[in-house]
Image (tube, grey):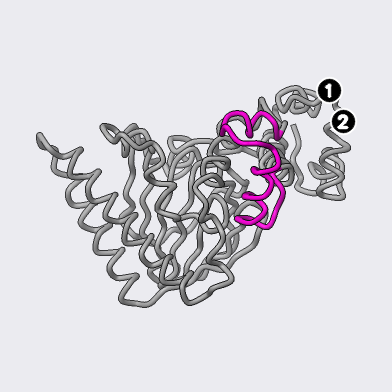
Amino acid sequence: MVTYENLHDTLSFYSIDCRQSYYISSGKPIFEFPKTPFRMDYYALCVCTAGEIHIEIDRQKYKVDVHSFLIAAPSTIVKFGKTSNDFTMKLLFFDKNFLIKNISNPFIIEKMNLFSKGSYSIIKTTAKNSSQLQNLLDYLDKKSKKQGKFTEEIIRTIIFNLLLEAAEIIEQENSSNPDKKEEGKKDLYLKFSKLIRENITRERMVQFYADQLHVSNKYLIEIIKKASGKTPHEVIDEALLKEAYVMLGNPDMTISEIAFELQFNSASAFGRFFKKHTTLSPSEYRMKENIQS
């Protein structure tokens, strides 16, 4: 079993050698997907143009069908399931550092409120909205094939347009579903989520994140609870569990090595943490998923 941890490795599954900071799909039918979960180290926008696909994101199961789109941030863990015979999608992968080059605000993507579920959104929209996103993806694909003096800046501008169009659609969706409106809206929550993605394998204490954000523990708990319905500790544990799933999916790593990488005092301490959240021990999970070295 192989775990795809980056854009190059993921695309190499399809014999695509992509060394750029972005990749745009052709929208042709895809008949095979990686069987294992993989953690993305890039941003992704995928628009379903026909048929349907079953997909698992951060251990949550979804069905994505025509006129639906997925937008996801780095660290999101994806596992593909069954697809219909007529399934097609258009997609864009890009690296954040490429997009925000020469941009002074490093949180510009986070401020668009694109990720209503923490690190991703899945939105069922109208044929018109879907067509708008697809047209921009087609335009992006066309421009990326013509290398000129301003090609990179043109690519960045089109990607920003795509993200803003997606943000507008998500905002409309949130407005028509008031229960979703509070999710992911607070700037502090977005910064907290970003810090966790960057530090989860090294730091698990809520105090560390409060100090980094220059707020008290109490205030951080209040804002994160309001924005996500969870305590900061629960958000940290979820992120840690995501890392554990990815590492357990790599048969070359022993459970002791994973415990060490995730800063647990021992393999048994890691085992207790994993079983508390999943009801399975790490070795039982590997047996269940048929992950063998």
Instruction: Report, in whole angstroms, how far the alpha carbon at label 1 lies from the one at label 2.
Output: 6 Å
Say what amino acid the circle numbered 1 marks: Asn
Closest to the observer, 199 or 44? 199
Give the percent coordinates (x, y) of residue 92: 36, 50
Question: Relative to residue 160, is residue 61 depicted above or below?
Answer: below
Which residue corresponds to mark 2? 269
Say which residue appears at 66% left-offset and 25% top-offset.
202
Count of numbered circles on the image: 2
Closest to the observer, 185 or 214? 214
- Per the picture, the main secondary structure of the magenta-coloured stretch is helix
* Quadrant occupied by the N terminus: top right
Say which residue appears at 57% left-offset and 42% top-offset.
193
Give the number of the disc on residue 139.
none
Secondary structure of the residue carrying tag 1 is loop
Say which residue appears at 13% left-offset and 43% top-offset.
146
Check residue 220 for magenta coloring.
Answer: yes
Give the percent coordinates (x, y) of residue 11: 43, 42
Say what amino acid the circle numbered 2 marks: Ala
Which residue corresponds to mark 1? 265
Give the percent coordinates (x, y) of residue 293: 74, 31
Check residue 185 for magenta coloring.
Answer: no
Left or right, 194 with reference to 137: right
Residues drawn in magenta? 206-232
Left or right, 138 with reference to 240: left
- Give residue 253's quadrant in the image: top right
Marks 1 and 2 close (CB-CB < 8 Å):
yes
Label 1: few (<14), some (14–19) or many (≥20) C-alpha neighbours in 10 Å: few
Secondary structure of the residue carrying tag 2 is helix
Question: Relative to residue 249, is residue 230 depicted above or below?
Answer: below
